[in-house]
């Protein structure tokens, strides 16, 4: 197992357990205390998303057999994070509904006559603006995640190209070694052929000298 991945994994598990406890305690609170607790939880969710991305990058940079195991585990953590987000969204929605009911109740207690059509319109406009803001935040996060996924894919492609280049370099190095060995063999063969020529020339010279001596003594 990769030590870097294990470090991120340990941090995420501790953070996830803490967020679960905070979600449970948030359901028992109301008013400003509940809002503060939800703010803390949202900060924790951002940290958890950052750890998920780091684990994803680290897993994709490893060998295929280890990468498959870690990515499978990472899918479980992503599912856990989505469950936490759904729980926070449910608590936040209940908080918003409660705030809206409280506001309407206060308005009713102040007197039904004071609740005019303009106040209702302003309340509806505020709710609509809040919904649009939430939609923009979700779209922004979606775009950010898509960009990060594209970055991960590009890093993976670059890593594969790097491996291919390293393999090609190793092959060229092997070819250079073979060429060097071939040059040495040819050089040795050339030296042997040159040496053999001198030996043959020397033997021929001895034969010619022997023939001359034989003829000399016969004709003498």
Image (cartoon, helix red, strand yellow):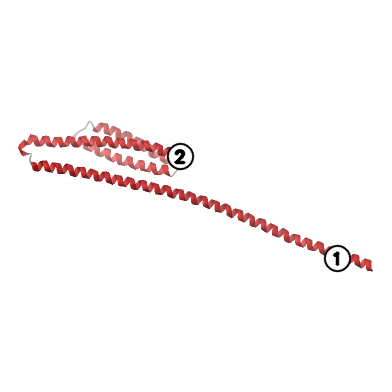
Determine which residue is flagged by label 1. 209
Query: In this rendering, is residue 169 above or below 104?
Result: below
From the viewer's side, name the closer residue of 5 and 53.
Answer: 53
Residue 111, visible in the rendered structure? no
Q: Quadrant of residue 52?
A: top left
Q: CA distance from mark 2 to mark 1?
A: 81 Å
Q: Quadrant of the N terminus?
A: top left
Could you say where residue 56 lies in the image, as x and y percent from the top left? 39, 42
**Cβ atoms under marks 2 and 1 closer than 8 Å:** no
Q: Secondary structure at mark 1?
A: helix
| Residue drawn at 57 percent across, 52 percent down | 174
Q: Quadrant of residue 189?
A: bottom right
**Is residue 170 shown left or right of residue 121?**
right
| Residue drawn at 44 percent across, 40 percent down | 67
**Is residue 92 shown left or right of residue 101?**
right
**Is residue 35 shown left or right of residue 152?**
left
Q: Quadrant of residue 101?
A: top left
Determine which residue is flagged by label 2. 66
Could you say where residue 125 lies in the image, as x and y percent from the top left? 15, 44
Could you say where residue 9 lies in the image, as x and y percent from the top left? 38, 38
- For residue 92, the mark is none
| Mark 1, other Cα within 10 Å: few <14 / some 14–19 / many ≥20 | few
Lower sequence index among marks 2 and 1:
2
| Residue drawn at 30 percent across, 39 percent down | 45
Q: Quadrant of the C terminus?
A: bottom right
Q: Secondary structure at mark 2?
A: helix
From the viewer's side, name the closer residue of 138 and 44.
Answer: 138
| Mark 2, other Cα within 10 Å: few <14 / some 14–19 / many ≥20 | some
Residue 76, visible in the rendered structure? yes
From the viewer's side, name the closer residue of 43 and 146.
Answer: 146
């Amino acid at each position: 197992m990769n030590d870097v991945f294990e470090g991120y994994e340990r941090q995420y598990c501790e953070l996830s357990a803490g967020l679960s406890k905070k979600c449970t305690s948030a359901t028992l609170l109301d008013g400003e205390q509940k809002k503060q607790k939800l703010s803390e939880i949202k900060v924790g969710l951002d940290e958890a998303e950052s750890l998920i991305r780091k684990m994803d990058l680290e897993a994709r940079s490893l060998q295929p057999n280890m990468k498959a195991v870690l990515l499978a585990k990472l899918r479980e953590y992503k599912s856990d994070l989505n469950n936490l987000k759904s729980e926070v969204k449910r608590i936040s929605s209940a908080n918003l509904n409660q705030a809206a009911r409280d506001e309407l109740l206060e308005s009713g207690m102040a007197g039904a006559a004071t609740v005019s059509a303009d106040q209702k319109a302003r309340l509806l406009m505020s709710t609509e603006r809040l919904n649009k803001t939430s939609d923009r935040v979700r779209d922004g996060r979606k775009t950010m995640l898509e960009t990060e996924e594209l970055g991960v894919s590009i890093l993976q492609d670059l890593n594969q190209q790097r491996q291919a280049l390293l393999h090609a370099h190793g092959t060229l190095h092997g070819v250079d070694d073979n060429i060097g060995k071939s040059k040495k063999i040819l050089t040795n063969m050339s030296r042997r052929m040159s040496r053999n020529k001198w030996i043959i020339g020397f033997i021929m010279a001895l034969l010619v000298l022997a023939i001359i001596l034989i003829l000399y003594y016969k004709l003498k």
